Amino acid sequence: MDKFLITGGKKLSGTVKVSGAKNSSLALMPATLLNSGSNIQFNTPEVNDIYTMIKLLTHLGVECVFENGTLTLNTKGINNQEAPYEHVKKMRASVYVLGPLLSRYGYAKVSLPGGCAWGPRPINLHLESLKKMGADIQLEEGYIIAKANKLKGAHINFDISSVGATGNLMMAASLAKGETIITNAAMEPEITQLAEYLVNMGAKINGIGTPILEIEGTDELYPANVKNICDRIEAGTLLTAAAITKSKIKIVYPDYKHFRAVLSKFEDSGAKITIDKDVVSIDAENLEALSVDVNTSIYPGFPTDMQAQWTAYMSLAGGICKVTDNIYTDRFNYVPELNRLGADIQVTNNSAVIKGTKKLRAAKVMSTDLRASASLVLAGLAAEGVTEVLRIYHLDRGYQRIEEKLSALGADIKRESGAEF
């Protein structure tokens, strides 16, 4: 197992380009199951979750070629509608193949998904919605077995806005008979891009970017190409690296509106944010950060995928603040590890109360999930001494060679093999 060795206290400077959005690619890739032919997806991040999805799609008969961020998916040879546990167990986003397979082929057998160990993320919204569209769904020995001669349009209201369910249902409805209306649909940029991609394939979707989506099913969709958006969570993580080390950096990100809520919180903490076309700059030099409360919420609110990084930053702020996760109630497993570095954080239910401290000190810490890994790396950048971050395979799921980007900015971070845990 690899680990990071981070010598803290280094100032960061320079400009770094943000990679493609993992969460967007993980929806765009299975969307190609809806057509037959060659699809090219540009700006695809080279992260482990993408390789996991490639293995799954290859198992289904998709020919995948991935080189230098360009992913070509040829769907002419699909010959399997079963997604086995060995592929799906690694990543919850694997459930995205359910809607397209069922809608196009009338059958799908998909293992119940795996992924990060924290928190309940049930897929009942996916399944109940597909039932409303006429699917027969059974759960047998850890598998979802779904059948439908032809899915039919339905009015689906989500009591809780769900990115995964919105994406899955939107794909399924694109080849269904009649109109499907999804209310309280997710509005995240990744869902908006998926909708636009489906339209480029020939789908008929109105209300893109709003909480009400109207999808008129069509008989056939066609291959299409797409350039993936950049990763707003990576962008926020890099900005946090500058803030926690009291540095000044620039990131290249074409649409800052995707993470406007995060930028606003940085400004509240005292950091200076400037935007010039595709470049977002943060100036935290000599900053004595103010403590700022955060409540995560659905887009366009503060994203749950940034709360661990924000908690790390606030551990060095001057005062007391509370970080509350309203999306997932059990996402603070990383806090004991931050406390090992000298943070003063107490967790109750879905909130963390953070008392800012003047210093963090190096220690050996262990990642528990993807974003937790990022929080420990950020804390290590600011801590005195050499911090060892173990189990960074979690981080490799969603960040493309983050250590190289941080090193290019001046961080002292090295990857080593053979970590113990």
Image (tube, rainbow, N blue to C red):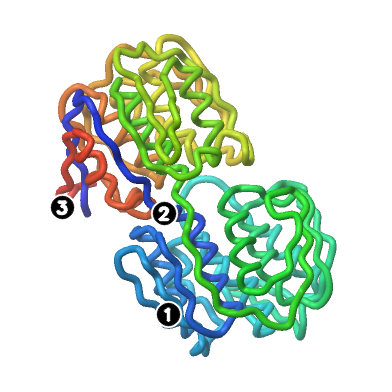
First of labels 2, 3 by sequence position:
2
Give the distance between the C-alpha atoms of the residues marked 3 and 1, in whole angstroms.
30 Å
User: Which residue is at 51% across, 59% downward?
Assistant: 92
User: Which residue is at 30% across, 20% downward?
Assistant: 246
First of labels 3, 1 by sequence position:
1
**Quarter of the image where one finds residue 363:** top left
Instruction: Residue 320: give x, y in percent of width and height.
Output: 48, 12
Numbered circle sitting on residue 20: 2
Q: Quadrant of the N terminus?
A: bottom left
- Label 3 vs label 1, nearer the camera: 1
Instruction: Residue 180: give x, y in percent of width and height.
Output: 80, 66
Numbered circle sitting on residue 418: 3
Dot 2 falls on a residue whose secondary structure is: loop
Between residue 343 and residue 6, name the one nearer to us.
6
Instruction: Name the amino acid type tagged 2.
Output: Gly
The answer to whether residue 378 is left or right of residue 55 is left
Between residue 227 and residue 288, name the one nearer to us.
227
Q: Is disc 1 surrounded by few (<14), some (14 to 19) or many (20+) residues within 10 Å?
A: some
> Disc 1 marks which residue?
58
Dot 3 falls on a residue whose secondary structure is: loop
Instruction: Residue 271: give x, y in percent of width and height.
Output: 41, 19
Vertical placement of residue 27 versus 150, above or below: above
Give the distance between the C-alpha atoms of the residues marked 1 and 2, in whole angstroms.
21 Å
Dot 1 falls on a residue whose secondary structure is: helix
Instruction: Residue 73: give x, y in percent of width and height.
Output: 45, 77
- Label 2 vs label 3, nearer the camera: 2
Instruction: Name the amino acid type tagged 3.
Output: Gly
